[in-house]
Amino acid sequence: MEMYIRAIEKLTIQRVLDWRAKEIVTTMTVVDDSQNVTPLQARPNSKQYKLYENNSPIMVAENI
């Protein structure tokens, strides 16, 4: 019975190691692909809004 339990433990550990290796390869692929992404550019017709302290929304609890 102990040999069976050891065999199951080894298989489980090997599955975790395989899964982790696959996760690392996938992460490296995603990181490499993200270098080709161009940064966001502001649109020519967009307007920048300034937020001031006195015009900022307040929580209801602050009015109590």
Image (tube, helix red, strand yellow):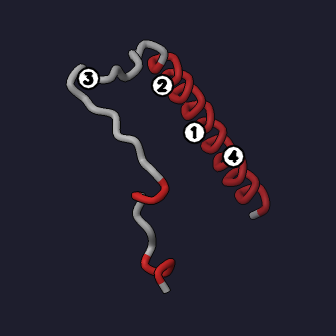
| Earlier sequence position, callout 4 versus callout 1 | 4
Q: CA distance from mark 3 to mark 1?
A: 43 Å
Label 3: how many residues lie within 10 Å, few (<14), some (14-19) or many (20+)? few
As helix, strand or loop, the secondary structure at mark 2 comes to helix
Question: Which of the two discs, 4 and 1, sits closer to the camera?
Answer: 1
Task: Give the CA separation, mark 3 to mark 2.
Answer: 27 Å
- In the picture of the structure, the residue carrying the numbered disc 2 is 30
Q: Quadrant of the N terminus?
A: bottom right
Q: Which residue is the site of mark 3? A: 43
Residue located at (49% from left, 55% from top): 53
Label 4 vs 3, first from the N-terminus: 4
SS category of the residue bearing label 1: helix
Q: Amino acid at mark 2?
A: Val
Residue 13 is left or right of residue 63, and the answer is right
Identity of the amino acid at label 1?
Trp
Along the line of sight, the residue nearer the viewer: 15 or 30:
30
Mark 1 is surrounded, within 10 Å at the Cα level, by few (under 14), some (14 to 19) or many (20 or more) other residues, namely few
Frontmost residue, 50 versus 59:
50
Residue 36: x %, y % from top left: 42, 13
Residue 54: quarter of image: bottom left
